[in-house]
Amino acid sequence: VRGILLARRMPVLPEVAIEVSGFARGGEWAARQFAHGLRQNVMAPASGSFRFSGFIWLQDEQSERRLCRLLPELQPCVTRADAIGLTGHTDSFHFNETAAIAAVHDPARYAKAWLSELGSNRGTQVVTNTLRMLYKLKGVEWLRLKQETALDALGRVAWVLRIRPDLELSQVLEIPARSRGNVVLVPWLCPASQLMYDQLLLLPAQDGAAPAWLASVFDPEHLVQAAQSTESMYPERIIFQSFQQGPSTTGLQVHTWPSGTSGMRLLGADPRGYRDPTVKLKSDFPECFRANQPTAWAETWWILLPSLAAALFVAAVVTYVFRRQLYDRMRRVLGIGRGGTTNHRSSHDSSLKSHSRMV
């Protein structure tokens, strides 16, 4: 009974749902690197403020099980394979990627926007890969909502962190204590070129609008509209344009995380296979990386404000102590007493008085 009462008194921490989706490369080695970076730079620093759950949608069951094994802190850790086991194989839309894409997307609808510069064979492959990525984004959010519905826990998740399984983090990503409205945080954003980072996103989840909108990018009514307004196949542009369509109905805003992309790298099959996750963007859009940094800091002042205030307070205390010590030291060197006169002056006056008496 005492244990039950203590458990009831303990506050329930808000939850961060980590959604891992994409194609896992590099096997066990890359999975360990990914798990270590996520643990050290996201989960451990925020463990006193949040609890974490995991939802994994990769290319095969083995890769999904591996991540759950390497990240036991994720409670629960739900995979696509788990959902298949619970619901069976009858729902092809959720479990058969190729069938799902073929059922709702006609490649010809995107030919004008995506295939003009690449040729039909290579272009079709690019479109298919992009659709597979977007389909996994939709699937992993479906997993989360299924789990919340089953546990009657809708609304308990504060944030959804979307990350691809081959992105290694090497510096801390601070998760804000609470969301500032429907503000989506990304490490990199370039509005001038209509691009936003799609490999890592932090989405407020209290009302579900932001995660639902990201999942809906796969839907034809959103994707066709985005594809028709661009001449490139960049997923970063598709996501940006889709979120541009969202604010009128969801109030979504996209801001940059203070950390940027400097502490991230894509994992390869072995330690020599590291890649800069923005290398192609830097090549194609160099102006974004020259001009985007000042706006990043301007947009994220509300995250940095508590740390800045604490730093200013510490600096003020240190300055006061230093000045006080310097002042006391100068008083000792100059022989200044409590009354403001120097000891030398006092002894000089005493000698004059003695001399006058002698005269």
Image: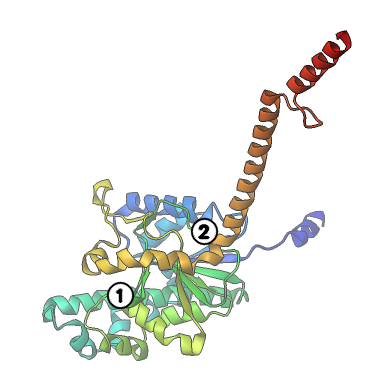
Q: Is residue 223 left or right of residue 114?
A: right
Which colour style is shown?
rainbow
112 relative to 317, above or below? below
Q: Are marks 1 and 2 in contact (CB under 8 Å)?
A: no
| Quadrant (top left/top right/bottom left/bottom right) for the C terminus | top right
170 or 102: nearer the eye?
A: 170
Front-most of residues 140 and 324: 324
Q: Residue at coordinates 81% horizontally, 16% vertically from top-left?
A: 352
On screen, residue 70 above or below 235: above
Which secondary structure, mark 1?
Answer: helix
- What amino acid is at disc 1? Pro
Number of the label disc, if any, that sits on residue 235: 1
Other-residue count near label 2 (Cα within 10 Å), few / some / many at <14 / 14–19 / ≥20:
some
Residue 279 locus on image (x, y percent): 25, 61
- The answer to which of marks 1 and 2 sits earlier in the sequence is 2
Residue at x 30%, y 75% (from the top left corner): 235
Q: Is residue 32 above or below residue 52?
A: above
Q: Which quadrant would the N terminus be assigned to in this image?
A: bottom right
Name, please, the residue furthest toward the top: 358
Question: At which x and y percent is residue 323?
Answer: 65, 38
CA gap, disc 1 and disc 2: 25 Å
Q: Secondary structure at mark 2?
A: loop
On the picture, is 268 further left or further right than 359?
Answer: left
> Foreground mark, 1 or 2?
2
How many other residues sit within 10 Å of disc 1, few (<14), some (14-19) or many (≥20)? some
**Front residue (pair 61, 183):** 183
Q: Which residue is mark 2?
A: 174
